[in-house]
Image (cartoon, rainbow, N blue to C red):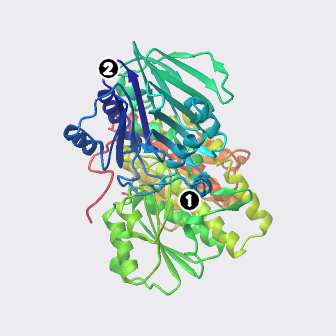
Amino acid sequence: MCGIVGYVGRGEALPFLLEGLRRLEYRGYDSAGVAVYHDGEMRLTKTAGRLEALERKLVEHPSAGTVGIGHTRWATHGRPTEENAHPHTDCRGTLAAVHNGIIENFAELRRRLSAAGHVFRSETDTEVLCHLVEEAYAGDLAAAVRRAARELVGSYAAAFLSLAEPHRLVAIRQDSPLVVGLGEGENYLASDIPAILARTRRAVILEDRQVAVVRADGVEVTDLEGRVLGLQVFQVPWDLAQAEKGGLPTFMLKEIREQPRVLRETLRGRIEGERVVLGELEPLLAGVRKLHLVACGTAYHAGLVGKQLIEGLARLPVEVDYSSEFRYRNPILEPGTLCVAVSQSGETADTLAALREARRQGLPTLAVTNVVGSTLDREAARVLHTRAGPEIAVASTKAYTTQLAVMTLLALHLAQARGTLPAAQAAELVRSMVDLPSWADRVLDGEEAAAQVGRVLAAHRDVFFIGRGLDHALAMEGQLKLKEISYIHAEAYAAGELKHGPLALIEEGVPVVALATQPDLAEKLASNVQEVRARGGRIYAVAREGDERLANLADQTMLLPAAPAPLMPILGAIPLQLVAYHAALQRGCDVDKPRNLAKSVTVE
Ligand code: F6R
């Protein structure tokens, strides 16, 4: 996820570009840049690092001009360096572009354009946009952008500034957001409404496959065939603070609701027909006989799910360690073991230390991280990026479900490579992953049922989570979410373990969240639920649609679409996040910034 902005008007472009980028920093902040047109020249200023670094550079070398584009980056292709920062340019430096999204066929396009003589200066997928438009240009920038778009596969919101037509910006979108802000004698472009709100509340929300030509005195929107479309002007009802959170009260809720979209991003380009394609891993996986996962907190819970999936589907043994324990317990690391470090931030000190220890012992390493350019990303031999975009709320939500998606892809990839599943079953599972985003959407439709459970739990001091198999890993995550943002004491148990001790804690009215997303284990879980009910416990169930066994025993049930069992932890996480969220809200807690916790724990 990145943020883009643009300005055309009578005033100076730079103040809006910087103010807009500041409002979009929640979309990315590893590098930034602007291109401003003035008097026959285009001046490019870019830096690695946060926006302040760009601002400092612009103080030293100011950029005057009334037309410009800007970008704040969250790297997906290429490290967060100055060369990879946007805007990028064509061969002659007469066309600049900023882009948010992923061009899936960029490698193929880059090869073709390079062979035709185009010179690339960055590692990014974005740069192909500049060269494609350069190639397609025949005196009309908008027409060139439309022509270039025919060759693109992937998601993009992009804005172009050309010396050949300097008093306009041309923008296009496909699967990435883009708005045009309408001002008086000036108009704006931005990835999201917060960026324009200090200037105007009138906006045109571009739809997929639309191209906008933005001038100081007007805006024209066409489809990809060049047909002019009527402008649908939207009056923004939110104030600035609301808008940064997409009109929602907290970042956490916004991030919970982003899950269908970021799951789609995480899967993008990694499934081809019936196969999982993880080109990033070649040839790392050849000869791997065991995996050793290291992670902390929520990422550790993703590791627990990963273990069950990889062992179950690919029949490879997996160990999972808390990063903070790994180094000190002198683990047995046999040759053929791959160390997989999972971390949203890529900066967690314990996880970095575990990775370094694994490397010191000669193990090959793989990182699963959300932050391109983070220390983990740079130090691991190979990386699988979750593409959740910046996560602002301390409690991890979308980063977790995208970690689970990557774990599932990894398990299926290994299973297909090793032939451990019947081909038809593997193909069916891979195909069904494509439906994950729309299933996640349906789970979000059930928010009110989860909110009701959250409000009930808010009145309790202790809550128990139980589940078997993958649902036990899910229970671990459910209890952590509840405890960290609502400060209610919560524990997770493997449901079969209850009778070996914890059952002593169950008395009249004690709430137990029972997870039954795994059809093979539902019968057994139902017996454990009976044990709880017999002692007066109250049952709040998460179950699959069509599976009545648990619903009949529960005081309240949150239903999930009946997806294949290995995919259920991703869907099951969502109601648990919502339960925790609404419990915390009910208790008046600061949901985005829980007490005593930090987003990134850079101390051991
Ligand atoms: C809980 C949470 C933490 C993190 C943990 C690891 O919601 O966010 O438990 O999962 O601190 O952080 P990363 O993934 O950045 O290594």
Q: In this view, does 367 lie above or below 131?
A: below
Residue at 62% across, 15% down: 230
Instruction: Determine the secondary structure under disc 2.
Output: loop
Q: Quadrant of ligand 1?
A: bottom left
Q: Relative to the observer, which residue lies in front, 553 or 534? A: 553
Residue at 40% across, 78% down: 358
Say few, some or many: other residues with alpha carbon within 10 Å of mark 2 (under 14 / 14 to 19 / 20 or more): some
Coordinates of residue 27 in the picture (x, y in percent)? 41, 41
Left or right placement of residue 174 versus residue 258 in this view: right
Q: Relative to the observer, which residue lies in front, 381 or 291? A: 381
Q: Nearer the viewer, mark 1 or mark 2?
A: 2
- Give the quarter of the image for residue 40: top left
On-image quarter of the C terminus = bottom left
Picture mark count: 2
Identify the residue position indicated by label 2 in the image: 11
Task: Residue type at mark 2: give it.
Answer: Gly
1 or 2: tag closer to the N-terminus = 2
Left or right placement of residue 9 versus residue 314 in this view: left
Q: Is residue 503 visible?
A: no
- Give the quarter of the image for residue 275: bottom right
Q: Can residue 479 be seen in this view?
A: yes
Identify the residue position indicated by label 1 in the image: 406
Left or right placement of residue 596 versus residue 70 in this view: left
Residue at 62% across, 66% down: 411
